[in-house]
Amino acid sequence: MKAFLILLFSTIPVFGLFQLPGEHAASKPVPLTVLIEETQQKNPDIQAVAHEYRAVNNSAKGAGALPDTQLRLQHLSAGSPRPFAGYTNSDFAYIGIGASQQLPWPGKRALRSEVAGLDAESVRAQSAVVTRIVIEQLKVAYFKLAYLQQTLGVLLRDDKLLGEMEQIAESRYRVGQGNQAEVLKAQLQHTRILQEITMHHREAGQVQAQLKQLLGRAQDSPDIMTEPLRERALPSSSADLLEQTRQHNPEIAFRQQLAKRSDKQVELARKELRPDFGLEYMYQNTDRKFRDYYMLTLTVILPNRGRHQAELAAASEHRLTAASELNAEIQRRLAEVQSQYVAAQTSAEQLKIYREGLIPQAEATYRAALAAYQANRQDFVTLLSAFHDLLDFEEQYQKELSEHESALARLESLTGVALP
């Protein structure tokens, strides 16, 4: 019965769980910088906003052009409705050829061109926002996958430590120094580690799917192997980060473009209160027996002041709205930078505590508990508790490292600059 229980739990399949999720695993780790470059080139969302900017930019080139020129062909008969009646015997019948052109008030065309150009710049700024969001999502997913892949190594190593504990418990049980409950507890902990490995595979598979979607890759393409995470240094002060956010944050730049466009729209609305002009020239031929006619017409197009005054008032309100939204965006992004800076700073302190305190202490405690258990000076529950502490601290360290790097990635996204 004893041998049967030991055999039952030790034959649970293990090595099939230790492969990365997906049918094809990548052969070597891929640097994050390579994936960022690939995302910028192939991500569908980034490509869509890039095409939209080019479309709007091309449209803006014609915004300041003159209205379309009109060509006119006239025919006037005299004495009869028949075509060309009286053309050879009357100086009233004629064939006329002319052209007309509408001329906006000076300055309107330039303002329209500027407004259209600022429209294009706002779309370009919006494309930078989309790129920022996609790259941030890529970085966070990459760091999470790195955490999962590195934690898998921790679980495998600790499972070997648990194997040592299980062998010692079995040996003690065989010679009558231990009890069956100790062996079963060791095997139960082994099964829990297998369960945790399975959960890691599920999370890793979900992150792989997200990364491939961001990269524009097929979902059945080879899985991505990450490089080991390393702790990057955080700037000593948040002041520089806040200033860089004011200057380089894509969302703030987008709101600034909208505010500039609103200013120009107010100027254009004021200009629209000025009249436009129309110029027409007509040449009329009345056969060679009679003298030709030449006609030049100047038209003044008076604006509807009530309608344009309402448009000016609306443009003024839109300008105030854009200014308020810009200020709100600045405050929102600066607060987010400060929050992420505090999170990264606290995370760096936690990593130091794990690295220099908790993990070494947990390792020493486990080794001491293992030696004491082998010498029959300590019970198995104390040894198992020490093992749990070591496993938890190692996993928490890897998770904290991932969160630290994710906070730095968000700071890079908010400030628009790369941190070393």
Image (tube, rainbow, N blue to C red):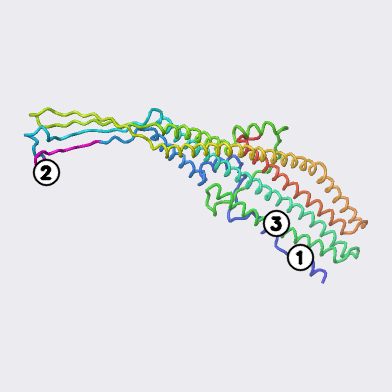
Per the rendering, the mark at residue 81 is 2
Residue 100 horizontal/vertical position (percent): 27, 33
Nearest the eye: 334 or 420: 334
Q: Which residues are magenta?
A: 71-83
Counting labels gives 3
Relative vertical location of residue 114 with respect to residue 82 in this rendering, above or below: above
* Quarter where residue 176 is shown: bottom right
| Distance from the alpha carbon under mark 2 to that under mark 1 | 110 Å
Q: Which residue is mark 1?
A: 9
Residue type at tag 3 = Ile
Residue 348 drawn at (x, y percent): 75, 40
Q: Of the numbered discs in the image, which one, if any, rests on residue 197? A: 3
- Label 1 secondary element: helix
Instruction: For mark 2, give the secondary structure.
Output: loop
98 relative position to 264: left or right: left
Identity, as a three-letter code, of the amino acid under mark 2: Pro
Instruction: Residue 216: give x, y in percent of width and height.
Output: 52, 48
Assign the C terminus to one quadrant of the image.
top right
Looking at the rendered structure, the kind of residue marked 1 is Phe
Q: Nearer the viewer, mark 2 or mark 3?
A: 2
**Badge 1: few (under 14), some or many (20 or more) residues near its Cα, within 10 Å?**
some
